Image: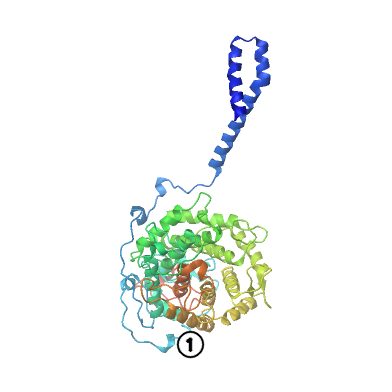
Amino acid sequence: MVAVWDRIRRFFRGIDALIVAAPGTVIDWACYEGKWYVGSALFHAVTLLSLALIAVSCPRTLVLPPDQEPTFDAAEVARNAMPPPVERFEVGNAPLDPTELNAETLKQTKAMPVGGQTAKYYDDSSEFEEARGGVVTDAKGPKLGGIGGFSVADLPGPAARGTAGWGGGGPGTGFGLRNKGHRAEILGPAGGTKASERAVGAALNWLYRHQSGYGKWSIDFRHQCKGGTCSGAGIARSDVGATAMGLLPFLAAGETHRSNGPYQQTVAKGLNWLIKQQRMNGDLSGGCDQPMYAHGLATIALCEAYGMTHDDRVGNAARLAVGFIERAQNESTGGWRYVPGEAGDTSVFGWEIMALKSAQLAGLPVNSAVFDNAQRWLHSVAKGEHLGLYSYQPYQQVTPSMTAVGMLCRQYMGIDPKDPGLLEGKRSLLENLPDNQLSRDTYCWYYATQAMHNFADRDWDTWNRKMRRALIETQVKTGCATGSWDPEKPTADRWGQNGGRLMTTSFSVLCLEVYYRYLPLFKTDSLVPKPSAPPGLAGHAENHSGP
């Protein structure tokens, strides 16, 4: 500090000297004193310029031009406004015979009387009947990216156009038969019951009651718990991932921000909050510790919402998110892990593949080279006699959960349903049927339920009966927690400590929505209801089967 003041005094003395000094003296001062000041000025100028360049180059929160501002109701909802009140749901002892879930039944928050039941759909019945025969989908018509790989030509007209009911099916109904018009027809044959639908309604009600006024959900949801009695807050910190897990069950039930259901604004506010977190490079993670987990989940939610509504603002955000996933893939291994470019792990890999396939179903472009490269990762973690069992990373042992993830990804990439490796994985899952008393793993059940559902056969029936009963029997039916699943009871969920009650509830209800969320890959003709042409149009029914 003393040296600095000394130089300042010498500077002003030099100025006084310059006034009367000879030219030679000026030159001497510039050579011996002035160069210090010139150097200091240049150093500070370079520093300030560098800081300005860093500020300009950092990713910024996505700000859309006025013509792309929200087109759904959330834009008109005050920032801290709470959703419209919906009465707390009573699960009750619902009838077990097939039914449909729609805007009307979701509003029936009181438990209904128990009705009749046929043995065909009852968990304790040993009888299994294939639904209307059916065969593996043939090659006619375009395939829709893997999920629900059915022929467009075989679909009912209104659903195929994505305009039916209060949720719609999206482009080519790639998102199953979630709409009101056909869900009741597919629910029973696919394995759903009134009890499972009642559980879905109660779960959506719990999720609705624990959404924040800003539209987001949190793994630690306690500050949103109006009753103050719900335990099971998770330790993970990712509001983006939690919000995606909150939104997906509503979308699976056909509830969108453009539907007329009771949760329209719930979905609108969730999507609005999610899109506002996106950065200019497409990243949706919100800066959490393991960003690719959150980004993958959020991308699935945006793609499903866009596919069901064609909302351009949602579609633009989904496109950016898909591009981020493509760039984040490790070029050498074909995998994804916690941060972009890492070598990979099968868990994160599964979420990114699901996101990319959801994008395809929604009609969004996806680079096919990404899928080709992804095969390399699956091969590196494949084990077993026929390479049908999978591990978390190449040097680790196989687990049921990673086998379920690997199987589903193989199915999405077009594997033959009779492939020995796929059947090997199927046998492994049947050896680890859902059981609340042995080991709860709703993450594993979520993936395995989708993989088994794609077969739509006797083995699916075996898995479904165990899964359905395990979830329906353990859903909370009293207090503020009604409709949720406790991550600690009746036994601790394997990942319950991390994801808490929100994750356990989200994955559980998504399992119970599988009957109509996606159509099964390998046997869809048996489940898709056939359209009946209106009078006078019988000869032109084929014109209503494509998007």
- The quadrant of the rendering that contains the N terminus is top right
Closer-to-camera residue (247/501): 501
> Residue drawn at (35%, 87%), measured in percent from left and top?
116
Residue nearest the observer in this picture, 322 or 287: 287
As drawn, is 214 to the left or to the right of 436? Answer: left
In this picture, is 437 found above or below 264? below
User: Crowding at label 1, few (<14), some or many (≥20) Cα neighbours within 10 Å?
Assistant: some
- Count all numbered tags in the image, as a single digit: 1
Residue in front for this viewpoint, 273 or 350: 273
Place of residue 380 in the rendered image (x, y in percent of width and height, measured from the top left): 68, 67
Is there any visible trace of residue 537 in the rendered image? no
Q: Residue 459: where, in percent of width, then height?
A: 54, 83
Disc 1 element: loop
In percent of the image, x 56 and y 71: which residue is there? Answer: 408
Residue 3: where, in percent of width, then height?
Answer: 62, 28
Looking at the image, residue 90 sits to the left or right of residue 64; the answer is: left
The correct choice, above or below, for 498 with respect to 526 in the image is above
118 shown above or below 47: below
Classify the position of the C terminus by image quarter.
bottom left
Quarter of the view holding residue 50: top right
Q: Position of residue 525 (x, y in %)?
A: 48, 77
* Residue 372, picture quadrant: bottom right
**Residue under the image location 57 percent in, 82 percent down:** 430
Residue 113 visible, this angle: yes
Residue type, numbered disc 1: Phe
Identify the residue position indicated by label 1 in the image: 128
| Colouring used for the render | rainbow
